Each structure stands twice: as structure tokens, then as C-alpha cells.
Amino acid sequence: MAHRVIIVGGGVIGLSIAEHCLRRGLTPVVLDQGPFAREASWAGAGYLDLRGASGVGGAFFSLCKKSYELFPEWTARLKKESGVDPQLLGSGSLDLAFTEEEETAIRRMEGNLKTFGHSGEWLTPSQTVQKEPGLSSRIRSAFYLKETRQVRPPRLTRALLQVLQKGQAELGELEPVEDFVLKGRQVTGVRTPRGLREGDAVVVAAGAWSGSLAEKLGLRLAAKPFRGQVVMYRAAPGTLRHILFTGLQKAFTYLVPRVDGHIYVGSTLEDAGFEKATTSQGMEKLKSGAAKVLPGLSQQLIEDTWAGLRPGSMDGWPYLGRVPGREGLFWATGHFTHGILLSAITGLLMSQLVLGERPALDLSPFALDRSPHSQPQF
Ligand SMILES: Cc1cc2nc3c(=O)[nH]c(=O)nc-3n(C[C@H](O)[C@H](O)[C@H](O)COP(=O)(O)OP(=O)(O)OC[C@H]3O[C@@H](n4cnc5c(N)ncnc54)[C@H](O)[C@@H]3O)c2cc1C
């Protein structure tokens, strides 16, 4: 059984794995090439929903649902142990249709959700504006889902880091993992510019950068970054009450209201390599998409803009499991658009694997050497 577990990557996935390992009595060593949790896990919106997963497939939906269900207990525990509130909120969401085509796309999503036993409520324009007074009166209809939640990613990772620090986990920032150390088939550690870090097990959770680490092992893992740009508005608390989704098929934009009034507007989905700069085109798309649904927003101050790199996989499903042909080496990457949602279950499952236990869910659909799953549909 592994005692000292090296986790490569200190985003929400690596930190969750470390926290779950710590709880089970293991000693986690988290190494990051930069500061902790400043990449995709800082950039993400943190809405937690099953809308997207419902169009993907059974095993993926089950993974998302299980993780969604873990959030209340997990975040309450983290809050208690760390003193940092990850701000899990049951905001609910409105999918807004301005055209018949958009309404059809939302109905398709509703059908997908129904196959998994989930239902929402259709609202007329006046019912919608009653729920959300700042909305454009041009909407045709809206689909309300009470279950949609949100968490605030920088707070979630801060809470995780506090718990890890208190639990005496080893935390190495600015320490890139350059290679793996193997004794035959068994991994015995990793190499960094500071020298050899020994461990009984190594879990790679290096997000969009995981492909080059796979190459060190002679593995060909389809993993690449997808840029997402974001605009953060400053507004008075209560300006927006629900999470809004619009343009499901063509110009997907969403607005997430934070408790302090900030409104997060995301996001583009671009294949731009490892380029993290925002672009005037991306900003324009987000600002005009947001103003279309919430006209008053154009009067509000833009507090910040940024972009992050979602860790893509060949089919949008994460890679979770053992590395074939190696002992003590595990992979947890490729969480793409669902990494904040999937962080809770990923931590649980990977800690079970490291401990040599049978994982709570069948991980074969997420194996590194699987055939690609079909793409999501709305
Ligand atoms: C704009 C945007 C909006 C999003 N919105 C949502 C959302 O609403 N809900 C949701 O569920 N998901 C969302 N996501 C997706 C989610 O943020 C990601 O899937 C998730 O953060 C991935 O976490 P990670 O830990 O795998 O990656 P990261 O957070 O990128 O962390 C990987 C870490 O590995 C480190 N690393 C890389 N290589 C090495 C190395 N060789 N050695 C050491 N360290 C290394 C990096 O420095 C980095 O810190 C969004 C993403 C973006 C960009």
C-alpha cells in the first residue's frame, strides 16, 4: 500500500486528490510548476450542473451526478476545517431562448435530462422577468432548473490548501516535475530541478500540460488546452439572482452572480494552444452576449478580464485510472469543461485507487487506453 503519494499539479483536481489522500492517512506531496491553483482552476466559473453531462452519455453523467451530490458535505467539511467558505450556493439557472432555434436546442437538452430522471420548468417571458427583473424583455421563453449550483473556485482551492497545510502535507510550488523515476515497472518518484522526490505512488493531475508528461513515459495521450476568456463585472449584490445560460448552440454565454454582487461572464471555447491572453474579439463576444440578456450590465464597471486553459481530452471525458504497464502510477486529467464539478469525485476515486481499493464507480469508461466516446450533443 502507498504511504507517500506524489501529486503532479496543484489545481483543483490535484488538491482534491491530496485532500482525500490526507483524510485516508496518506502523506500527500503536491508539486506545481507555478503557484498553486492559478491556472484553469482559478479561471473557471464554478457552476455545477448536469445539463451538459446529460447530452454526453451514461457513465459520464453518473460521474458528474455523483460528484454534484458530494459537494454539500465536502464543502461544509472544508469550510469547517479551513475557515474558508467555498461559497456553495443553490442559485438555480435559467436557459434563455430568444429564437425558435434556441428554444429547440433547450428542449433537446430538457429531453436529455429527462432520460436521467431530471426535470425543470418552462417559464413565459413575464414569469421569467418576475424571477429575474433585470432581464431583457425580448426573451421568448426560459427553462428553469432549480438544481443548478455554483461554488467559487478560488475559494474552494484556498480551502483545500489550508486543510493540506494544517495536515502537514508537503507542498512544493514553483517545482516543475520533469520526469518520472522508475525501478522496472514500479514508479518510485519524480525528478524536479530541486532533485529527486521519492514516493510510493505518483498521480498526474497536470491539467492541460499533461500531454508532455505522458510522452516521458512513451504514452500518446490526446490532451490539449482549450482557451476560455472571461469578463468580470462589478455590480450591486442582488443585481442578478440566477445563473443565466444563453446561445446554447452557436454563441454560448453564461452569467454567474456571486454573493458579493460580482457577475462572471464566460466564456469562449478556443483552440489557441497555450496562449492565455484575452482578445478583443473574445471580449466583444462576451460583452455583447451578456448585454443581450441583461441590458443594464453595459452600465456596470468591468473589474477584470482573464483567460484560462481547460484541459481537453480526445472526447471531453477525463482520463482517470492507472497507467497501463506501470505500477504505482495514476492519471487524473482531461476534465475539460467539467473539472470544478468533477473535483469532488475525482479526489475520492483516485484516493481509493492509490489505496488499492475498488473505486466507488467503474473507471473503465475513463481508461487512458480507451477508444474515444462520441461527442456531446444538444
Ligand atoms: C473560463 C473557464 C470556465 C470554466 N468553468 C467551469 C465551470 O463552470 N464548471 C466546471 O466544472 N468547470 C469549469 N471549467 C473547467 C475547470 O476549470 C477545469 O476543468 C479544471 O479547473 C481543471 O483542473 P486541473 O486541476 O486539472 O487543471 P489546472 O487548474 O490547470 O491545474 C493543473 C496544474 O498543473 C500544473 N502543472 C502542469 N504541468 C506541471 C508539471 N510538469 N509539474 C508540476 N506542475 C505542473 C499547472 O501549473 C497547474 O497549476 C472552466 C474552465 C475555464 C478555463
Image: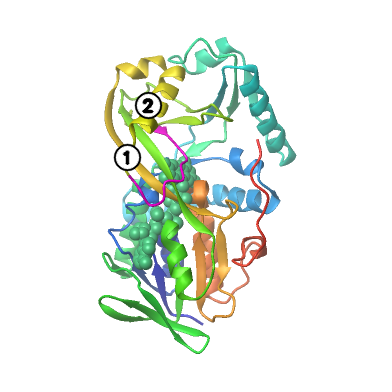
Q: Is residue 85 visible?
A: no
Q: Nearer the viewer, residue 294 or 70?
A: 294
Q: Is residue 223 visible?
A: yes
Q: Residue at x 54, y 26 (%)?
A: 247
Q: Nearer the viewer, residue 142 or 138?
A: 138
**Is there CB contact under 8 Å for labels 2 and 1?**
no
The stretch in magenta equals 264-276
Q: Which mark is residue 284?
A: 2
Looking at the picture, how far across and down is residue 195, in whole percent? Answer: 28, 80
Taking 223 as reference, is 269 above or below it? above
| Picture quarter with the C terminus | top right
Q: Which mark is residue 279?
A: none
Q: CA distance from mark 2 to mark 1?
A: 13 Å
Q: Nearer the viewer, residue 26 or 142?
A: 142
Residue at image mark 1: 306
Depth-wise, is mark 2 or mark 1 nearer the camera? 2
Q: Is mark 1 within 8 Å of ligand 1?
A: no
Taking 88 as reference, is 261 above or below it? above
Looking at the picture, how far across and down is residue 53, in whole percent? Answer: 61, 44
Taking 157 as reference, is 190 above or below it? below
Locate residue 232: give its quadrant: top left
The disc, 2 or 1, on the residue closer to the chain's N-terminal end is 2
